[in-house]
């Protein structure tokens, strides 16, 4: 007599079994920078010398005065004077230098991305082959196959790793990648997502130009770096440790702000505009609404100073504006200000550096009486777009190895 076949589960039951039980969490963080570090007080001399512009004495003086207001003390840059001398076309706005720039970043960006990724994977404690998904974002180039493909070999990932490549998302790219990783981890049981962001400002490097204040800001503010985060749900004890649980994620476009930040590819690299006056105002006028929209549905009713904060330090003016609007205590944006000071604005990479700095500060606070349990990630980029993620600290704020 034959056995009775088991009932086929419903599609709903199959889907439910494929999902994680708990929330996605940050399991490890790694960061990396090029070897070339330039103190900010030395950069004007470096910049005007490297661009053969020392004769523009008045503009150089203005450049030095602008630098004092940016909140940056040093930056790491891939481009050196030797590289710039080898490519004089990078100094000419009208020269067709795009191909040469793309050739350089095609190799340099994946290598820097791999360096940060290896640090994150080492902290995570499991083999690279256990990574199931890869999300990579960069504004530095637009290659096919891209950085994601190169990382398979550089890191020893499985050929079956599921890859997503995000290009040209500006400064909110890191948060967008983390938002995607959250969805992947929570909807694929056992998934381990490697998020990688890497940027080289060589794509927007150009020489000084009389009458272009915005150009001075761009050259004095942005730096190079890479950050990596391992994201997964239901950590496997004792190897894995959840640093931050990723409770919710949202994206908001600020009305009538489409021209505040723009970027496009040109024959000479990247063109575009960042309105240093409008952007802080747009953000200040909308930050509280974005926060309420994210926190109220969760029932998190903490005051702003009861939270921890990981805010993208696009500029000191943006941080100052947020401080003023939210009436934050001085230490609340200390992680963001420290990263801006030590590295400059690294586009989407920057928020990963802020998270790394923040988790170390929270660990120190735990040792002297307790740290906030709830916190917020906020980043800003072209659109004008605001990314908001609510985090829950788990108590595993161990320092990077």
Image: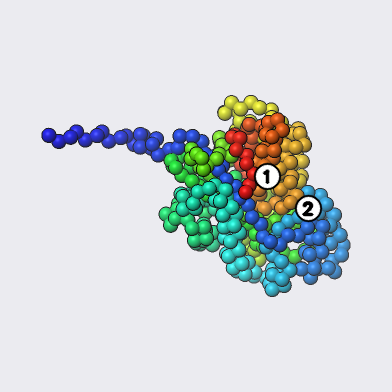
Q: Dividing the image into 4 quarters, which one contains the N terminus? A: top left
Query: In the image, what residue occupies the spot 65% across and 52% down?
Result: 347
Q: Is residue 316 visible?
A: yes
Counting residues from the start of the chain, the first of labels 1 and 2 encountered is 2
Q: Position of residue 104 (x, y in %)?
A: 61, 67
Q: Position of residue 34 (x, y in %)?
A: 67, 60
Above or below for 70 versus 91:
above
Q: Is residue 282 visible?
A: no
Q: Identify residue for label 1.
A: 357
Query: In the image, what residue occupies the spot 70% across and 51% down?
Result: 345
Above or below for 338 versus 272:
above
Q: Which of the labelled discs sits on residue 183, or is there none?
A: none
Above or below for 199 versus 330:
below
Q: Identify residue for label 2.
A: 73
The quadrant where residue 159 appears: bottom left
Pick the front one: 258 or 376: 376
Pick the front one: 271 or 375: 375
């Amino acid at each position: 007599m034959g056995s009775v076949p088991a009932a086929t589960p419903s599609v709903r039951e199959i889907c439910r079994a494929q999902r994680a039980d708990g929330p996605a969490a940050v399991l490890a963080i790694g960061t990396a920078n090029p070897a070339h570090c330039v103190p900010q007080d030395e950069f004007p001399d470096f910049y005007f010398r490297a661009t053969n512009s020392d004769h523009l004495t008045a503009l150089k003086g203005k450049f030095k005065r602008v630098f004092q207001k940016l909140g940056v003390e040093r930056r790491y840059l891939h481009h050196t004077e030797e590289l710039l001398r080898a490519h004089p076309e990078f100094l000419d706005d009208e020269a067709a230098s795009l191909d040469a720039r793309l050739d350089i970043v095609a190799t340099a960006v994946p290598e820097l991305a791999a360096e940060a990724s290896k640090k994150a994977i080492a902290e995570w404690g499991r083999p690279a082959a256990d990574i199931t998904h890869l999300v990579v974002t960069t504004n530095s180039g637009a290659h096919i196959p891209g950085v994601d493909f190169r990382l398979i070999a550089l890191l020893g990932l499985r050929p079956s790793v599921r890859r997503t490549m995000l290009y040209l998302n500006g400064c909110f790219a890191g948060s967008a990648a983390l938002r995607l990783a959250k969805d992947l981890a929570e909807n694929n049981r056992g998934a381990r997502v490697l998020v990688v962001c890497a940027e080289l400002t060589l794509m927007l490097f150009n020489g000084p130009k009389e009458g272009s204040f915005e150009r001075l800001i761009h050259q004095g503010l942005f730096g190079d770096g890479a950050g990596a985060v391992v994201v997964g749900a239901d950590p496997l004890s004792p190897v894995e440790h959840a640093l931050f649980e990723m409770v919710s994620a949202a994206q908001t476009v600020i009305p009538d702000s489409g021209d505040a930040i723009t970027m496009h590819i040109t024959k000479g690299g990247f063109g575009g505009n960042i309105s240093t006056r409008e952007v802080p105002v747009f953000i200040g006028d909308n930050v509280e609404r974005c926060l309420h929209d994210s926190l109220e549905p969760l029932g998190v009713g903490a005051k702003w100073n009861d939270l921890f904060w990981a805010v993208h330090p696009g500029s000191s003016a943006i941080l100052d504006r947020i401080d003023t609007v939210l009436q934050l205590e001085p230490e609340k944006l200390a992680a963001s200000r420290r990263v801006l000071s030590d590295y400059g604005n690294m586009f989407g990479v920057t928020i990963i550096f802020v998270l790394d700095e923040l988790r170390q500060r929270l660990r120190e606070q735990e040792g002297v009486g307790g740290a906030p349990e709830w916190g917020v990630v906020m980043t800003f980029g072209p659109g004008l777009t605001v990314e908001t993620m609510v985090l829950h600290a788990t108590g595993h704020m161990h320092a990077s190895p």
